[in-house]
Amino acid sequence: MILYKYMSFDATKKAIETPSVGFSCLEDLNDPFECTAFGFKDDENTIVNARIATNACKNRFSRKYGVLSLTRQPLNALMWSHYGDSHQGIVIGIDVDMAGLSDMASCIIPSQYGEVIYTATKPHKDMPIISSEELMDIGDSIKFDPNTYNLVKRAFLYKSLEWGYEEEVRIVKNISALPFSYHFSEGRHDNWRKINISGRPLYLLDIPVEAIKEVYLGKNIYKNISRRNLFSHDEYCYLLQSWKDKGIALMRCEPDINSWNLITHMIEI
């Protein structure tokens, strides 16, 4: 299965040169309601109410797991505007099986179970408050299995209906054992590399370059490159040819004259 990532030109270039995908912590995503859809019941027999339980779970989930956000649709004009650098960036198509992103043994949520659930209302008072033992399992021994899936699904996969245009699919991995502090450390460990971008950590997971199957170039990408004096036209063509030599299909996006849709053309160099 191929899923898609909207990226800037610079980020795409780095992702192909050192093949990798980036995982972010929940607190660094752009929705303030992340990890608040547990819907715990208030229990009069305990001092722990739904708000306390929700905040405790959010704190445990927040920095112990990395989230990779992909989408099913490479030709969404709103996504291009919001995440594709206003049609100046790139969308890459990733074979999630080849990239190891569908592996249930190494993912808390693998790609085939990571479709985001968009709802008009949050789950409400329908889940028992978890025990302290279950809370401490978060980031420790919790695995992907039927017994824990409902909890991790509520933590990572529920979003407001307003976000539905994204058609998001998430892959979630446990990053708690990586030897990097949230704020400062950068470096490499096994097949992970941590970098900091504007004070926020990004955890890069190595993938085979063969897993990058497609590249969609935004309509205004060369305008962006020319304005920043990044490449001459010949250098730009050489870069695209180098991607093509890796077996990546290259396509250019542009508005359809007869509809509100984006259409693609194969790039011949």
Image: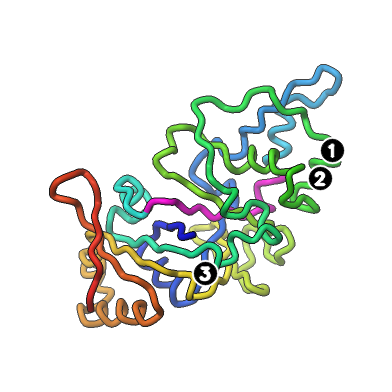
Mark-to-mark CA distance, 2 and 1: 6 Å
Q: In the rendered structure, find residue 20 and report the number of the disc placed on it.
A: 3
Q: Residue at x 68, y 61 (%)?
A: 106
Instruction: Say which quarter of the image contains residue 260.
Output: top left
Q: Secondary structure at mark 2?
A: helix
Give the x, y percent position of residue 207.
55, 71
Judge the density around disc 1: few (<14), some (14-19), many (≥20) Cα neighbours within 10 Å. Answer: few
Q: Residue at x 60, y 59 (%)?
A: 102
Q: Residue at x 51, y 30 (%)?
A: 119
Do callouts 3 and 2 mark residues in contact (Cβ within 8 Å)? no
Q: Looking at the image, is mark 1 or mark 3 earlier in the sequence?
A: 3
Which residue is identified by label 1?
A: 132
Horizontal arrangement in the rendering, residue 225 relative to residue 96 (left or right): left
Q: In the rendered structure, find residue 216 and report the number of the disc placed on it.
A: none
Q: Is residue 43 above or below residue 62?
A: above
Q: Secondary structure at mark 3?
A: strand
Say what amino acid the circle numbered 1 marks: Ser
Horizontal arrangement in the rendering, residue 248 relative to residue 226 (left or right): right
Segment tinted magenta in the rendering: 60-73
Q: Looking at the image, is mark 3 or mark 2 earlier in the sequence?
A: 3
Q: In the rendered structure, find residue 136 and report the number of the disc placed on it.
A: 2
Q: Nearer the viewer, residue 33 or 200?
A: 33
Q: What count of labels does the image hold?
A: 3
Give the x, y percent position of residue 261.
24, 47
**The stretch drawn in magenta includes residue 54:** no
